[in-house]
Amino acid sequence: MATLEIFNRQVRDTATEMVDQEVQKFNEASGGALIMGNESVIGDYVEEASWAAIAGLAARRNAHADKAVTAVELNQLLKRSIKVDGRIGPVKMTDTQYRRIGASVEEVAAIVSAQAAEGIIRDQLNTSAAAAKAAIGSVTELAHSVATAGGVPLTLAELNRGNAKLGDRSALITAYLMHSIGFHELIGEALNNDNRLYTIGDINVFDGGLGRRYVVSDIPALVEDELLHTLGLVAGGVAVQASGLTSFVTTETTGRENIQRMMQGEYEFIVGVKGFQWAKTDVNSPTDAAIATAANWKKIATSHKDCAGVLITTGKTGS
């Protein structure tokens, strides 16, 4: 029992530490458009992004009036967010399997920790992308769609036209979150993919020049039949606050042909999209489908220019 407790603690602590380390690298590489991390990391990045651009700070004043005015809000991104629950496993392994691969408890813990950390980060990215795509796509002024029956590839020109949805604030877009299909379409046009800034599993971040980054991952929400969705995000546009692997349990089962060990863990994180709030206050532990539903996100920013970014849709429409 003592050995299992040590194993559980080692997996939990190591996975949490790895998630913290990896997301800090991700945040730096992605330019802070999609922020992931624990409470202190999120606080620093959101505060920095908020101070960089406080919407509505300067406004017209009536010198002959004495009415109440609304205070400019700062650092409210995560207060309008949604909590998401996830799990690792369950994974079953027998003692015979341990022995045959010659693995010690420490080696197995390291393997499980690394895979858990990668899985958590991938889930955070997939979920936050689905939330951002649903929220931003619900605002007509932020959606740029050029998909046709014949098909339109993603090009630098279309990215630029999408940026124009933010008007004079288009320069605030610091990163594109895109599917690998779109990224390779850009490479086929003119983009150089030599400058890889970060990678973990199938998630990659590239420097595209002109101060913008390309976060590339095959995120399910960014492909819809033959449509391809690309998000252009401003600094602090999406935030994911996570606590790593909150619990990890291993149980031993006897009375069967082989002694079995069952491993299972739990984690949770909070997703916030700038300029929007989660509209379903009666929904706890939302499903992927609920998070990806536009009607579940409500625009609260006065101007669309104060939102998380733009949505660019290319590809082929249904026949």
Image (tube, helix red, strand yellow):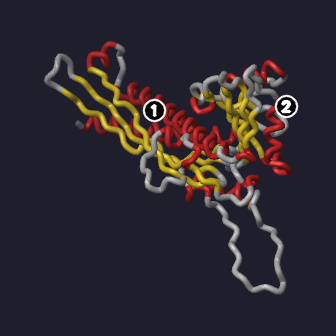
Q: Residue furthest top?
A: 100
Q: Residue at x 79, y 45 (%)?
A: 165
Quadrant showing the C terminus: top right
Q: Position of residue 263 (x, y in %)?
A: 32, 31
**Residue holding disc 1:** 116
Residue 193 visible in the current orientation: no
**Residue 204 placement, left or right of 284:** right
Residue 231 badge: none
Q: Residue at x 54, y 36 (%)?
A: 121
Say whether disc 1 or disc 2 marks the residue closer to the N-terminus. Answer: 1
Q: Nearer the viewer, residue 15 or 136?
A: 136
Using the numbered discs, state the Cα–Cα distance from disc 1 to disc 2 in whole angstroms. Answer: 39 Å
Three-letter residue code for mark 2: Ala
Q: Residue at x 59, y 33 (%)?
A: 221
Snapshot quadrant of residue 66: bottom right
Mark 1 or 2: the one toward you? 2
Is residue 183 shown above or below 243? above
Residue 157 badge: 2
**Residue 65 placement, left or right of 265:** right
Residue 130 visible in the current orientation: yes
Q: Position of residue 286 (x, y in %)?
A: 45, 45
Mark 1 lies on a secondary structure that is helix
Three-letter residue code for mark 1: Ala
Badge 1 crowding class, 10 Å Cα cut-off, few under 14, some 14 to 19, many 20 or more, is many
